[in-house]
Amino acid sequence: MTKQYLVDQIIAKQSYLCVGLDTDIEKLPAGIPKTKQGVIAFNKAIIDATAPYCVSYKVNTAFYESQGIAGWEAMEETLAHIPSTHFTIADAKRGDIGNTSSQYAKTFFEVLPFDAITVAPYMGKDSIDPFLAYQNKWTIVLGLTSNPGSQNFEQQKLANGQFLFESVLEQVSSWASAEQLMFVVGATKAADLAAIRKIIPEHFLLVPGVGAQGGSLEDVTKYGKNNDIGLLVNASRAVIFASSGNDFAEAAAIAAKGYANDMKILLENK
């Protein structure tokens, strides 16, 4: 998917919502079997209910990989059910030396034809280049995450006065254009978004942490939006597990519509 197509979808819907399919098999609603078919049925119902209100789906691969072959098959069927109009992300956080990254890229861009994958930049440029070799595919690099452990490395000051995450953003953004690269910035770090936008003004930001993790959609939009909007704000548990009853799909639709309505208002008040 091209950047322009994604931007057009966001403008048409006035929504930059990404629904996270972090489908924990142990949290499936009552009446849904804790099996591969249960996961698939749940995901399909969530996708059908929320598709009108979002522009993207993020599949957290850990919830599927932990189920072995059945989980991989569930992930494959889930991906196949997502409409082609929606941007698909494999939240896999891969990162390794070049030849291993090449296999990861093949896995998530060819075997499982996602539009994008999240990667960790710790091992440097040669670990990310294999992903960037794919045209019309996106590499989403961890920038500033919202977990407490981000202080261990990401927020350490370098000798030049930069934070490590600022150096990562600056260097990685020079390796490819804003047509191929996005960055992860946690919603609970919204106060840092204005400074981040000075480093990467044109790139899309994938922003987790709104909803169950307490991030502010208003702050993320205010400080993170660029001329193309440039945001994909992810909500996972707050949408897909909005209800644990038989009305889980309807509740997910209501939650997703709520986010979309808030986004529309924020964009109208720009």
Image (spheres, helix red, strand yellow):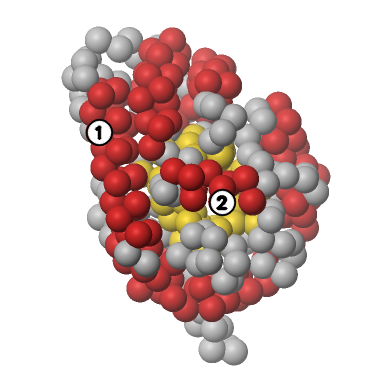
Residue indicated by mark 2: 7
- Whether residue 65 can be seen here: yes
Residue at 48 percent across and 37 percent down: it is 57
Above or below residue 38? Residue 207 is: below
Mark 2: secondary structure: helix
Label of residue 254 in the image: 1
Residue 39 pos. (x, y %): 41, 18
Mark 1: secondary structure: helix
Quadrant of the image occupied by residue 48: top left
Left/right placement of residue 160 relative to residue 243 reads: right
Residue at 49 percent across and 27 percent down: it is 64
Quadrant of the image occupied by residue 214: bottom left
- The residue type indicated by label 1 comes to Ile
Q: CA distance from mark 1 to mark 2?
A: 24 Å
- Whether residue 237 can be seen here: no
Left/right placement of residue 168 relative to residue 39 reads: right
- The residue type indicated by label 2 comes to Val
Residue at 34 percent across and 52 percent down: it is 263
Quadrant of the image occupied by residue 53: top left
Single out the mark in the foreground, 1 or 2. 2
Question: 253 or 106, which is in the foreground?
Answer: 253
Residue at 63 percent across and 35 percent down: it is 114
Residue 117 pos. (x, y %): 61, 44
Above or below residue 136? Residue 199 is: below
Determine the residue located farthest toward the bottom in the rendered image.
Answer: 160
